[in-house]
Image (cartoon, helix red, strand yellow):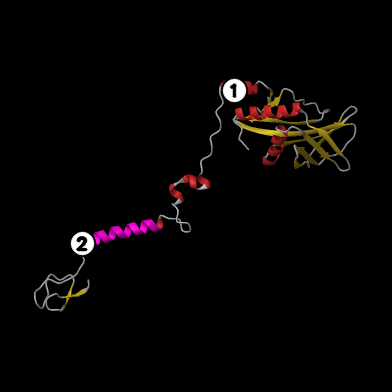
Amino acid sequence: MALVKCKECGSEVSSEAKVCLKCGAKPQGGIGILAKLVMGVIGLLILGSVFGRSPSTGTRDARTTPTENSSLASVAPAKVYSEKERATALAKMSVKTDKVEGDKWYRDRSTSESIDRNAFYIYAGEKESQVWLRFVVRYSSSDWIFFDRIIVNADGDTFEFSAPSTQQHVGDGYVSEWLDVSVDDASYRLINAVAHSKKATIRLKGRQFDKDREITASEKKAILNVLEAYRVLGGKTF
């Protein structure tokens, strides 16, 4: 409620009074119901425009567009392989099934498991719809080097990989040392670079001596074949 001047006698009168108590005239001023409604709507629109903006940039509220928020961005769906593509990829694999634990192991047919040979390869495992990759580097010769680090140069790019937990074996006239570990992001980058390289040289750094050799074209092809089989089995993309 507010006091306004009467337009006839100038006396102060309530804005809600129907007539001036002094002269009987209708009081001046007062905001009508319609005007109040209009002003209320305008106020709500102003508030909406203010709070609908991001505090610092004035852009749209990220909640209205999920893809503008990296944590809500949609993940690209995995490629769907046809039965023919799946069969072609898996035909390149030798498959062994662990009869006790049920694991299946996929290796390229050209890959030798003999521990008396140098090797650089990957293989895939599968169990209950879970698929994973493992990475093997093996050294075999007449003398130990006890390697604990791997350095690979692939077309000029150098990668280093720690190998603190190698295994050893003494054979008839030879010794073997090898690393067999799960593939992670770092080892995947190394493996992928080797598989697509024109020339890749691996150095096994030992306690006193190093051993260098060039990774063969057959080893690179085998890696690509296993990666293809891994994908058709539903393996994740690194």
Determine which quarter of the picture holds residue 123.
Answer: top right
Q: Name the kind of residue labelled 2 in the image.
A: Ile
Report the side of 65 relative to 82 (left or right).
left
Where is the C terminus found, in terms of image quarters? top right
Determine which quarter of the picture holds residue 47.
Answer: bottom left
Residue visible at 72% across and 38% down in the picture: 190
Q: Position of residue 58 (x, y in %)?
A: 45, 56
Report the side of 158 relative to 90 (left or right).
right
Determine which quarter of the picture holds residue 167.
Answer: top right
Q: Which mark is residue 33?
A: 2
Q: Name the kind of residue labelled 1 in the image.
A: Glu
Report the side of 36 relative to 222 (left or right).
left
Residue visible at 85% across and 37% down in the picture: 211
Give 134 or 60, whichever is nearer the viewer: 60
Q: Magenta segment: does it hold 186?
A: no
Q: Earlier in the sequence, mark 1 or mark 2?
A: 2
Give 71 or 195, whichever is nearer the viewer: 195
Residue indicated by mark 1: 85
Task: Say above or below: 132 vs 41.
Answer: above
Where is the N terminus found, in terms of image quarters? bottom left
Q: Secondary structure at mark 1?
A: helix
Q: Magenta segment: does it hold 44?
A: yes
Q: Position of residue 54 (x, y in %)?
A: 45, 56
The residue stretch that appears in magenta:
32-50
